[in-house]
Amino acid sequence: MAMDPLGRTASSSPIERESDLWWERLSAWTSEALEAAGSRITGEFSVLRRTPWRIEAAVDTGLGRVRVVETVPSHQFEGALLATLTRHAGPVALRALAVDRAAGRFMVHDDAVPLASPPQRRGRRAAVRADEPAVKDLLQAVTAFLPAWAEAQRGLAAHRTDLQMSGTPAMDPAWFPAFTENQLASHAERPEGHPLHLSEEEAEELSQRLRPVVGDSARTLMASDLPLMLDPVVLATQGPAAGDLAWRDGAREGERNGERNGKRGGERNGERDVVVTRLADASLTHPFSLVRTVLEACAWLPDEADEPLAAALSDWISRVSRTGDVRGSLPTVEAALRVAPLAEYSALLRLSASPQADPEDPDVRQAGARALDCLRAVGTVPSRWERIRALL
């Protein structure tokens, strides 16, 4: 029986990951999904990434190289969320080629590269110049992404139920004060040596520092009366080889022309586009949280990038805010910047505090340490913000 590439299939019995039987079932699922899309596997599977929470494997197919991801139950919403974006948000996210919601499995093109990776020279990160191709490419991609993401948000607003039904976690600012206090208490109760342990002294110190910041920021965000929107937390670039990404004016016409000319849709003279990726980290939260995501992804850019970044962010803020008043929105933006680390913190808790997490596993310990660092970062703003703010 043919499988709907975006539909739900029957869940298989629990089996040990990477056993022969597991690989047989993964291969069979991938073959069936590709057959439904008129394609097939043309190579061998190789493991790209293996963590306690997910396995990512790549394989060559008639559609190009694809990545098949399988997640633990606490992350099973990722594929369903990706399918929702594929249906309703156009080309701002990795396109879901196939999704098995019950198994926490999905398939995408294998061409995404994390943004926050400056060019390296002799194995070390070095200062970059404004005229370097990597800087120009990232600025062009970000300035194309932000207005497209604003449009996608408007499109997704009519499908809020689909986002919620996919199981996407919510981080409502109204919950932030109680959430922060409860989490600090839970960290102090963890045994010493646990990756999520905080001493009682540090937990109390953080509580005293964060209580007024989180409370004031939450009230400001709630007063803005903006609906919760998807914060991806992680962005990546994706090249034309992946196929179907084009955001600039006339993109859809360009895709049609590209198809007629035998090109893959979304090709923009070899440029790379910014896409939303790793939706296991995503949550529904205040939309201005995205400003921190963008600034942190672009942190390595030289000072000369401030002006184009500010112009792109100003345009995005005006599109997202109800009034279009960028200067008037700045207090709300800054409130969102201060509490934005809570969304990433919550995502990291889904890793380090999940039932599948072994406290002794190095990946779990790293995720726990990063979660605590995010908690400590609440109340701060990216160092670049002051310069950007002056240009808005």
Image (cartoon, rainbow, N blue to C red):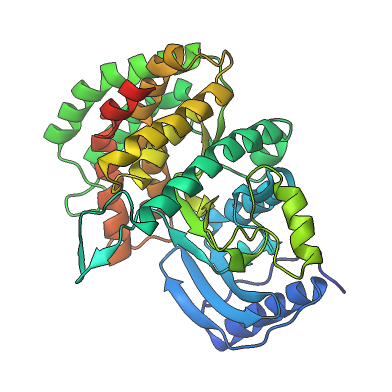
Residue 245 x, y percent position in the rendering: 64, 55
Which residue is rendered at x = 81% and y = 65% of the image?
Answer: 260
* Residue 379 visible to the viewer: no
Q: Nearer the viewer, residue 133 or 374?
A: 133
Tell me: residue 336, above or below residue 48: above
Q: Nearer the viewer, residue 61 or 98?
A: 61
Q: Which of 101 and 14 is in front in this view?
A: 101
Left or right relative to 176: residue 363: left
Which residue is rendered at x = 51% and y = 83% of the image?
Answer: 46
Total label count? Answer: 0
The answer to which image quadrant residue 156 occupies is: top right
Left or right relative to 173: residue 259: right
Q: Name the quarter where the C terminus is drawn.
A: top left
Residue 352 x, y percent position in the rendering: 36, 53
The answer to which image quadrant residue 153 occupies is: top right
Which residue is rendered at x = 15% and y = 34% of the image?
Answer: 202
Residue 206 x, y percent position in the rendering: 20, 29
Q: Name the quarter where the N terminus is drawn.
A: bottom right
Tell me: residue 71, above or below residue 285: below
* Residue 70 visible to the viewer: yes
Which residue is rendered at x = 67% and y = 80% of the image?
Answer: 61
| Outermost residue to the front | 131
Left or right relative to 49: residue 96: right
Tell me: residue 5, above or below residue 182: below
The answer to which image quadrant residue 387 occupies is: top left
| Outermost residue to the left | 201
Q: Which of 173 and 327 is in front in this view?
A: 327
